[in-house]
Amino acid sequence: MVRTISQRGLRNDNAEIVRGVEAGETYTLTRRGVSVARIVGPSEGADLRCINPARKRPRYATQQRVEASTSTSELLEDLRGER
């Protein structure tokens, strides 16, 4: 059975719709009442491996921490000046 959902419905209920697709449901997406797309799960045997994985970001926690000689509140007070 194919269910019909609007673009707004997809935006508002995307988690529910993804769960439905995972369960094998098919959706027809409409915009202003006109069908524009079909949302279906991957076909059996489909290869969904990531071809170009994201790179890991540098680990900033391993870098040495810099200590300021003045407190943040003093720096802000100096920047704000007299108002």
Image: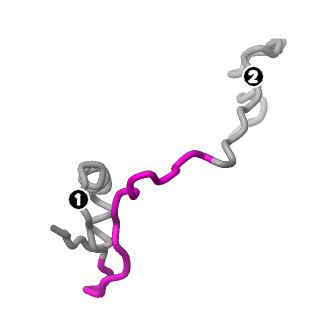
User: Is disc 1 placed on a helix, strand or loop?
Assistant: loop
Residue 51 placement (x, y as % from top left): 66, 48
Query: 39 or 13: which is nearer to us?
Result: 39
Categorize mark 2 by other alpha carbons within 10 Å: few (<14), some (14-19), many (20+).
few
Label 2 or label 1, whichever comes before in sequence order: 1
When asked about the image quadrant of residue 62, the answer is: top right
In this picture, residue 70 sits left or right of residue 45: right
In the orientation shown, which residue stands out farthest toward the left?
1
Quadrant where the N terminus sits is bottom left
User: Is disc 2 placed on a helix, strand or loop?
Assistant: helix
Which residue is label 1 attached to?
25
In the orientation shown, which residue stands out farthest toward the front?
45
Q: How many marks?
A: 2
Query: 70 or 6: which is nearer to us?
Result: 6
When asked about the image quadrant of residue 73, the answer is: top right
When asked about the image quadrant of residue 68, the answer is: top right
Dominant secondary structure of the residues highlighted in magenta in the image: loop
Mark nearer the viewer, 2 or 1:
1
What distance separates the C-alpha of mark 2 from that of mark 1?
A: 43 Å
Residue range (magenta)? 30-50
Residue 37 placement (x, y as % from top left): 37, 76
Looking at numbered disc 2 in the image, what kind of residue is underneath it?
Tyr
Residue 18 placement (x, y as % from top left): 31, 52
Categorize mark 1 by other alpha carbons within 10 Å: few (<14), some (14-19), many (20+).
some
Which residue is label 2 attached to?
60
